[in-house]
Image (cartoon, rainbow, N blue to C red):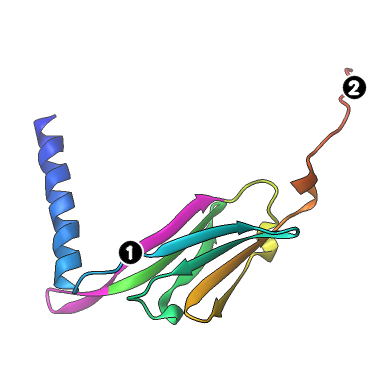
Amino acid sequence: MRRLDKLTTELLTSIDVLNTLNGGVVEAKVKLSQHDEYRQIDLLAPSVAQENLKAEIHNNNLTVYYNTPVLSNEKLIQVPKVVYNKQIPYFIDSANIEATYEDDRLVVRLPFNERSEGYHRDITPH
């Protein structure tokens, strides 16, 4: 248990150090809204250029992130900072999720599929 506490402390300290070394980051704002045909996610990260916000679907999870460049051993590496990461609900049409840049934010639209009105069928015993 003591080793785990030390590891946790070191990890949290390194995260804080990365943030400090990179000049700090303003916390991203995530706004969720519901419309008739889709759900919408608006993401604003004031200290990040909008074109650096990326969205991807992997294993039925929607993740929005940006990379922070960090110099390590004289090599520039990109460290991802996750802004949003949630499982895509069954009633969202994953194949038609779209993202656009609008004003100073990334907008992700998640269209509903045929199950958004609920699913019903009779099950006949054999």
Q: Secondary structure at mark 1?
A: loop
Q: Is residue 122 above or below residue 94?
A: above
Q: Is residue 40 left or right of residue 66?
A: right
Q: Residue at x 34, y 71 (%)?
A: 67
Which SS does the magenta portion mostly show?
A: strand
Q: Residue at x 32, y 76 (%)?
A: 47
Question: Mark 2 against mark 1, which lies toward the viewer?
Answer: 1
Q: For residue 51: magenta?
A: no
Q: Quadrant of residue 112?
A: bottom right
Q: Which residue is mark 2?
A: 124
Residue 108 lies, in percent from the top left, at 58, 67
Q: Is residue 90 above or below residue 50?
A: above
Q: Is residue 52 above or below residue 117?
A: below
Q: Amino acid at mark 2?
A: Thr
Q: Is residue 36 left or right of residue 110?
A: right
Q: How many marks?
A: 2
What residue range appears in magenta?
69-87
Q: Which residue is mark 1?
A: 27
Q: Secondary structure at mark 2?
A: loop
Q: Residue at x 80, y 50 (%)?
A: 114
